[in-house]
Image (spheres, rainbow, N blue to C red):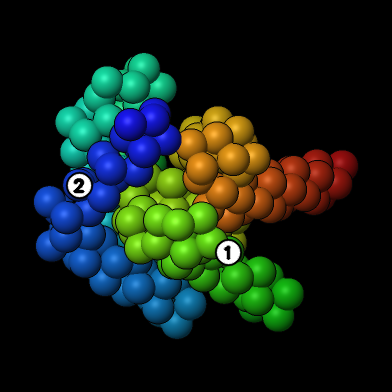
Amino acid sequence: MTQTEIFWNLLKGFRDDTMVVQVLLIIGMLIVSWLVFTKPGKATDAFTKLFLAAAFLWNAVACFLFVCGKSPVAKFLGAPLYSVIGFLFLVDLFITGKTHFEVPRSTGMRLATTFFILLAFLFPVLGYLTGHPMIALPGYPCPLAGFTLALLAAAAPRADRGIYILTLIWAFVNIPKSFGYMDCYEETTLVLTGFYALAVLKYRDTQQEKHIR
């Protein structure tokens, strides 16, 4: 069995063993999407941060440490990175309150946010193109990161910069997969979302600098 086959078998086993959790994560992502678009405010911020904290911490332990723990990237990068992101969402929720989840009213921004959120949900469907459909579900680490980056880009500049940068790191770490490493072309969705989120962050920084001047 090749390394790629082992990788996908691990993810398939993780899907089967945690299906109830995966369904709950998908439902949570749908609720968050609806709240951010239609009912922005303190309650939405609190629910979104709590959900994302739980989702990142879950993936840090269950996916990166237990299922993929033999991989140095998962054990020494993925698990610590996702643990820190999950912790920072809790800090943002209970202490700093830096992030306010809301989609700007401009048509372009709303369409872009909708598109990149949809990419996260389409992640497992795109597996049909490479022979492993519906394995890496939307609540898995990579589509979750893409989903989070779409939300943070919409929230910028009112988004915790530390969370933003750390999530971007995971997006760009996966660039090799978008070129076929581990036969995981689905990662193209995460990488594209990463470049979009980076461009939005740079644009917001530039706008703030002009405003200060």
Q: Nearer the viewer, mark 1 or mark 2?
A: 2
Quadrant containing the N terminus in the rendered view: top left
Horizontal relation, residue 157 to residue 206: left or right: left
Closer to the camera in the image, 137 or 30: 137
Quick one: label 1, few (<14), some, or many (20+) residues within 10 Å?
many
The residues bearing labels 1 and 2 have C-alpha atoms spaced at a distance of 27 Å
Where residue 105 appears, x then y in whole percent? Answer: 64, 78
In the image as oriented, which residue stretches furthest toward the front?
A: 1
Q: For residue 13, which numbered disc appears in the image? A: 2
**Residue 10's spot in the image, x, y percent?**
26, 40
Q: Earlier in the sequence, mark 1 or mark 2?
A: 2
The residue drawn where x is 33% and y is 56% is 135
Q: As rendered, which of 139 and 136 lies closer to the eye?
A: 136
Query: In the figure, is residue 67 to the left or right of 33?
Result: left
Can see residue 17?
yes
Q: Tag 1's secondary structure? A: helix
- What type is the residue that disc 2 sits on? Gly
Amino acid at pointer 1: Phe
Q: Is residue 85 visible?
A: no
Asked where in the image residue 77 lies, by quadrant, the reply is: top left
Residue ID at (35%, 63%):
134
Q: Looking at the rendered structure, which numbered label has been put on residue 116?
A: 1
| Residue 200 position in % (x across, y down) | 70, 52
Residues 123 and 35: in front is 123
Q: Percent position (x, y) of residue 120?
A: 47, 61
- Above or below residue 80? Residue 167 is below
Task: Relative to 81, say whether 93 is above or below.
Answer: below
Residue at 35%, 73% (x, y): give it. Answer: 30
Give the quarter of the figure containing the C terminus: top right
Q: Residue at x 28, y 43 (%)?
A: 9
